[in-house]
Image (cartoon, helix red, strand yellow):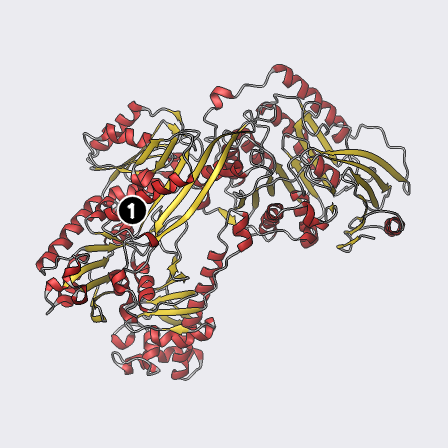
């Protein structure tokens, strides 16, 4: 165990692995830094890919030396985007507002009567008959997964808990909306709950398979999965919310950049891959978080995520020249670079032509570039240079659009308007395969210094390896209603009229500590950030009738202490 | 009823850190539950709803509208500037064509703020709609604007600012001034000599319900808009006609507001009053946003609608029918006595204005030059109980040479007088001057 000091962490190794779209990267990290790395092509069979990558990484290493293992995988993402979700039934109660029929998801979606208003007061009781009828219909369809959601359940989970009680005989572990996030957003709560229910079976199978692979190699250290918010969760603990492990790739890159190239100020992170480039921002040592939640395929969710953007330009993007002599790059990837036997020229071929990269057959790269040269009326070398410049320009355009978008996000208090913080990077860190070769052109178009850290090619695997466990809780206390709710922690209890901000803070802190430990992490006070802290007087007829307290607290994404100061 | 989807801009500024005083209705909590409801509905995730970030308005935006005594900084806080700036952001989004319409859900409100500002009246310091409209006129060259004020209180500030402006049609629907603050807004208040008929007051009896509002919309508001042909329609979207509002006595509903908005189709809506912060605002605002975006609003209904909404009484219906018939005669058929003044006359009007929130008492003497060629030279002399005595001169956009001459002579004359501050608001050249002898 890593926490056991007698087990000399100096000799311990950490294994990190990131499954990418085309390549799977894995690293072994010692106290001296990255000691080895492997790359294997990502196959159609995720388990086989994992088996191969893990096997190659630990080959010749005594398994007991590996004290921590962390994985950024594509199991959940693939199930969602390839539409391989298990059928899940949904029972939803709403109330005034948008018609809940419009949020239908899955093969068996049922809206039942019942309403909680925005403070959590029951405005209409649940329709018991309708809930039982819905359960019966879901069962009759042979569906084994169930999601239960009511509007404003984060203010009062009573209706969801009531439905769960009624469902218990047939569905012992339904997914419930108030547990997925403390944030308000009914449509996203429905979708997120549905994804957790629909991923349950396949995620369980995946976890079992991964456990077997690790057992086969004798690996026994604590194991984690990476989440899109740049934090990790214990492998077993991930079973509660499988959707939280989807689309962790961009987070792996950004956490890798944070680990390999620490710095101050505002840093732009670019991970240039084969097919895509991921963009992210590190602000004063912490990656920027998305305000609402990640989009997974067609689904807008409440799953916390780093704020990233993926664009369809990478080293293997297809390069074309229009009749108007303009270079087009991506978003298509028609195969590997021409130098490696691919069908069309790519930015990687341009790097090979310019002698910036040694790979494959330079002759083929040159030949592939010739038709482009002909259209542009340039020498082949000039053409290759133009391709790299154009690649950098296109990436820079997306970076500017991304920054513009971030800086337009609304704020709700006078203080924030006047502070008017704008995100303006002062430097960039480039990671990914063709990182070093693009540094120059990107520096020119973006006008900020660029760093390419050592091991930039496997930064994502490093990111997975050294990211700490994250968690968040939200608390809402309403002394007028006499209740406090911490939905993620399952707290919903009575309070007296004296309940104040300090008590709220203590309660939220305790809930967060519990959540972190349950997710397989260690609670460290300085890692906690309070992201919302508001206390409103509630007035009726010029009299104070209560206090409404809103708190959000989280462990921000960051690096495990074992990593500190390695680079 | 669902219409074609529209792109709707949303400017949301709940000012969670600003209040007039801790227990005042205009306080931090006011839009808390509205934000909760809007967030929970997931409206911001819809492709056709775009949220914009607010920024503060500048003093020069205010100077196009007001004479602030002694100056803008003294009668505003950051929150007022941001609220007005939020309206400007909404207007820019519409005028640039980024969205089809926009809703500025901002606080504090503004429609009781008049041209001269000594302090706070009816929770308002500066008139956020007027500041927005004058910004639009300056930046985008728009001339004819209609304002439909659906707040329960007479929009006396907006009326004052546009009293002499024939290019602004101001229609206010409100609870009868004999029964509520500010005690004005009667049908005989029709606008100044150069803008007669461009101010329309529709005082509704207490307990007016959905039915009454819809009759007034169909019989008066829509035909008036049809004949005025504005380039832009603004809704001063106060929400205190709601049956649960604590400081008014009306009987309107969230669905009613939504339906009214779907019918009115404003280019820009601006939140004004509305103090049933829990039982009305969350639903009314949700309804207005959905209506503006062209969504089906039939499922927007207060949880206590069945229990608390009372159908309109036959008495109220009769009163509204009579009122509507009378106002149609005056405003749509032009049946009123012709005024007896002639071009070139300078008319004087004396008024007393009370600032309820700040307890200020103001005496005003207003001069307007009757003119056929422009909106006329305007002079305002104002003395407040705090002791300040000022004179303001306004030169309207498109001013004629005679009115400019008159206005400048008033300014020169005032400069030789004993005023603490003299203002010149030259809207034709977009210049503002303040002299403090």
Quarter of the image holding residue A355?
Answer: bottom left
Residue A166 appearing in the image: yes
Please name whichever residue, B47 or B365, is drawn nearer the observer in this view of the structure.
Answer: B365
At horizontal 80% and vertical 28% (from top left) the residue drawn is B335
A136 in relation to A550, above or below: above
Quadrant position of the C terminus of chain A in the picture: bottom left
Q: What subunit carries mark 1?
A: A
A162 in relation to B318, above or below: below
Q: Which residue is mark 1?
A: A513
A236 in relation to A256, above or below: above
At horizontal 31% and vertical 42% (from top left) the residue drawn is A511
At horizontal 38% and vertical 75% (from top left) the residue drawn is A439
Percent coordinates x, y for residue A401 in the rendering: 47, 61
Quarter of the image holding residue B208?
Answer: top right
Q: Is residue A255 left or right of residue B149?
A: left
Please name whichever residue, B36 or A444, is drawn nearer the observer in this view of the structure.
Answer: B36
Label 1: element kind: helix
Percent coordinates x, y for residue B87 in the rendering: 61, 46
Q: Is residue B152 left or right of residue A378?
A: right
């Amino acid at each position: 165990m890593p926490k056991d000091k007698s087990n000399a962490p100096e000799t311990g190794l950490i294994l990190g692995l990131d499954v990418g779209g085309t390549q799977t990267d894995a690293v072994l990290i010692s106290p001296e830094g990255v000691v080895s790395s492997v790359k294997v092509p990502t196959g159609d069979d995720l388990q086989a890919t994992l088996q191969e990558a893990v096997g190659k990484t630990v080959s010749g290493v005594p398994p007991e030396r590996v004290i921590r293992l962390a994985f950024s995988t594509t199991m959940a993402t693939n199930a969602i985007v390839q539409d391989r979700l298990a059928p899940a039934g949904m029972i939803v109660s709403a109330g005034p507002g948008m018609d809940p029929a419009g949020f239908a998801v899955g093969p068996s979606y049922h809206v039942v009567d019942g309403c909680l208003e925005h403070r959590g007061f029951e405005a209409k009781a649940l329709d018991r008959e309708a809930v039982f009828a819905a359960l019966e219909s879901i069962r009759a369809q042979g569906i084994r997964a169930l999601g239960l959601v009511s509007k404003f359940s984060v203010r009062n989970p009573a209706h969801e808990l009531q439905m769960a009680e009624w469902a218990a005989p047939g569905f012992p572990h339904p997914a419930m909306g108030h547990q997925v996030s403390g944030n308000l957003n009914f449509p996203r709560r429905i979708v997120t709950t549905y994804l957790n229910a629909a991923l349950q079976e396949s995620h369980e199978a995946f976890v079992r398979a991964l456990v077997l692979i690790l057992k086969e190699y004798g690996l026994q250290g604590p194991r984690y999965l990476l989440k899109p918010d740049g934090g990790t969760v214990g492998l077993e603990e991930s079973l509660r919310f499988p959707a939280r492990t989807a689309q962790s790739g961009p987070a792996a890159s950004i956490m890798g950049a944070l680990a390999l190239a620490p710095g101050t100020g505002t840093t732009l992170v670019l991970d240039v891959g084969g097919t895509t480039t991921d963009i992210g921002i590190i602000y004063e040592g912490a990656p920027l978080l998305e305000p609402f939640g990640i989009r997974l395929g067609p689904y807008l969710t409440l799953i916390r995520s780093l704020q990233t953007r993926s664009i369809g330009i990478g080293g293997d993007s297809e390069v074309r020249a229009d009749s108007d002599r303009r270079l087009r790059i991506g978003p298509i990837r028609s195969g590997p670079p021409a130098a490696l036997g691919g069908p069309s020229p790519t930015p990687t071929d341009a790097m090979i032509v310019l002698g910036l990269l040694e790979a494959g057959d330079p002759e083929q790269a040159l030949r592939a570039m010739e038709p482009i040269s002909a259209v542009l009326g340039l020498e082949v070398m000039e053409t290759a240079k133009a391709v790299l410049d154009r690649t950098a320009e296109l990436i820079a355009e997306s970076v500017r659009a991304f920054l513009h978008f971030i800086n337009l996000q609304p704020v709700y208090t006078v203080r924030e308007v006047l502070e008017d913080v704008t995100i303006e990077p002062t430097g960039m860190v480039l990671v990914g395969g063709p990182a070093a070769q693009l540094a120059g052109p990107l520096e020119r178009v973006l006008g900020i210094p660029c760093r390419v850290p050592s091991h930039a090619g496997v930064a994502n695997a490093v990111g997975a390896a050294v990211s700490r466990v994250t968690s968040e809780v939200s608390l809402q206390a309403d002394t007028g209603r006499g209740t406090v709710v911490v939905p993620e922690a399952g707290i919903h209890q009575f309070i007296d009229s004296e309940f104040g901000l300090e008590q709220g803070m203590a309660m939220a802190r305790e809930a967060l500590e519990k959540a972190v430990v349950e997710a397989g992490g260690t609670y460290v006070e300085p890692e906690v950030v309070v992201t919302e802290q508001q206390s409103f007087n509630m007035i009726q007829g010029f009299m104070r009738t209560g206090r409404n307290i809103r708190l959000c607290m989280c462990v921000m994404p960051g690096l495990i202490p074992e990593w500190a100061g390695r680079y | 009823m669902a219409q074609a989807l529209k792109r709707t801009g949303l400017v949301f500024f709940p000012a969670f850190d600003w209040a007039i005083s801790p227990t005042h209705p205009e306080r931090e909590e006011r839009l808390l539950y509205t934000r909760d409801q809007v967030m929970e509905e997931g409206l911001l995730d819809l492709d056709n709803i775009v949220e914009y970030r607010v920024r503060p308005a500048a003093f020069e935006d205010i100077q196009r509208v007001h004479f602030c005594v002694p100056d803008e900084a003294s009668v505003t806080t950051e929150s007022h500037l941001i609220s007005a700036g939020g309206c400007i952001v909404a207007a820019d989004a519409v005028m640039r064509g980024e969205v089809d319409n926009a809703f500025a859900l901002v606080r504090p409100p503004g429609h009781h703020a008049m041209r001269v500002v000594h302090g706070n009246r009816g929770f308002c310091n500066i008139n956020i709609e007027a500041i927005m409209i004058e910004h639009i006129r300056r930046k985008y060259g728009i001339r004819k604007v209609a304002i439909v004020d659906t707040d329960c209180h007479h929009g006396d500030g907006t009326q004052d600012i546009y009293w002499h402006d024939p290019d602004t049609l101001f229609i206010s629907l409100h609870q009868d001034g004999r029964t509520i603050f500010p005690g004005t807004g009667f049908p005989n208040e029709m606008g100044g000599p150069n803008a007669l008929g461009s101010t329309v007051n529709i005082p509704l009896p207490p307990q007016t319900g959905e039915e009454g509002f819809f009759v007034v919309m169909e019989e008066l508001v829509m035909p008036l808009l049809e004949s005025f042909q504005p380039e832009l329609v603004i809704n001063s979207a106060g929400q205190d006609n709601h049956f649960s509002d604590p400081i008014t006595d009306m009987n309107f509903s969230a669905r009613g507001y939504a339906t009214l908005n779907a019918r009115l189709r404003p280019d820009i809506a601006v939140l004004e009053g509305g103090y049933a912060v829990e039982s009305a605002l969350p639903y009314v605002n949700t309804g207005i946003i959905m209506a503006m975006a062209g969504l089906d609003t039939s499922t927007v209904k207060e949880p206590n609608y069945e229990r608390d909404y009372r159908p309109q009484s036959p008495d109220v219906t009769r009163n509204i029918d009579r009122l509507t018939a009378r106002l149609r005669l005056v405003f749509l058929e032009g049946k009123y006595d012709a005024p007896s003044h002639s071009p070139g006359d300078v008319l004087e009007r004396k008024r007393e204005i009370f600032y309820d929130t700040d307890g200020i008492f103001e005496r005003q003497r207003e001069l307007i030059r009757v003119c056929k060629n422009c909106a006329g030279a305007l002079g305002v002399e104002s003395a407040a109980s705090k002791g300040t005595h000022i004179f303001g001169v306004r030169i309207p956009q498109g001013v004629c040479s005679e009115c400019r001459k008159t206005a400048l002579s008033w300014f020169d004359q005032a400069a030789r007088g004993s005023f603490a501050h003299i203002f010149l608001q030259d809207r034709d050249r977009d210049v503002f001057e303040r002299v403090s002898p």
